[in-house]
Amino acid sequence: MSPTGTSSNFHTEEDILIEDILILNGLTTDMLKMHEGIWVNINGRGKIRGTCSRCVSQFEYIVEIKGEQEYVSVLDINQYESTPTVDVFLIDERHELDVEELVRQSAIVGNDVKVLCSESCKGICAECGTSLNSNNCECVERSTDPRWDALIKLTKGKI
Ligand SMILES: [Zn+2]
Ligand SMILES: [Zn+2]
């Protein structure tokens, strides 16, 4: 058992797929041994697949993965009188520390959830559902903002 304060660091080189997140060029993991557990710090970049809320197409985008979390061994936790109230992640009986959950949380929490495939996404036609990013449909020409309808009628009435 190494003394408190010892840190270690490792870096994986290859891409890793954790659920929907593809970690690009590996992940750097720093571990610092604390009084009662291990403080883990991860750093990397990942690729996430999202669905555009405007045109509902699937697209991929890059996220920063930065997160830190305290891990406590399940073996140690069983020795405590009461369960720790702080949010700790557990190291299992085989002394394996699972960073997947931390990666997932970091990827989501640390980044604005991106909902548009691009700022200039034109969305889909409300009439026929055609994606207006790649196509123009027949409806576009004649469709007006419904809020204008009342005004147009009014104007016509006056004239
Ligand atoms: Zn879009
Ligand atoms: Zn249309």
Image: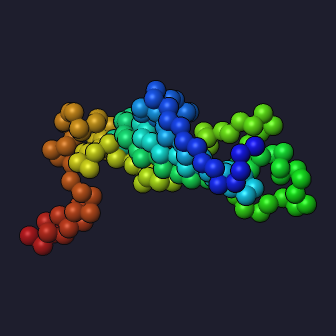
Report whether 16 appears left or right of 59: right
Drawn side of residue 84 relative to residue 28, left or right = right
Task: Look at the image and tell me in which quarter the N terminus lies.
Answer: top right
Q: Nearer the viewer, residue 14 or 49?
A: 14
Q: Residue furthest bottom?
A: 158
| Residue positioned 47% across, 54% down in the render | 110
- Residue drawn 45% across and 42% down? 44
Q: Give the tally of numbered discs.
A: 0
Where 129 sits versus 5, above or below? above
**In front: 54, or 50?**
50
The one nearer the camera, 85 or 12, is 12
Q: Answer left or right for 71 relative to 28.
A: right
Q: Looking at the picture, how far across and down is residue 129, in whole percent?
A: 33, 37
Place of residue 139 in the rendered image (x, y in percent of width and height, measured from the top left):
21, 40
Residue most extreme to the top: 14
Residue lying at 43% horizontally and 38% vertically, measured from the top left: 46
* 35 up-or-down from 66: above or below: below
Image point 42% across, 36% down: which residue?
47
Residue 12 percent across, percent down from the top left: 50, 31
Is residue 63 visible in the rendered structure shown here? yes
Which quadrant of the figure has residue 70?
A: bottom right
The quarter in which the C terminus is drawn is: bottom left
Instruction: Give the colour scheme of this rendering.
Output: rainbow
Relative to residue 53, is residue 145 depicted above or below?
below
Give the percent coordinates (x, y) of residue 128: 31, 37
Of residues 19 and 152, the one nearer the viewer is 19
Q: Residue 95: name its quadrant.
A: top right
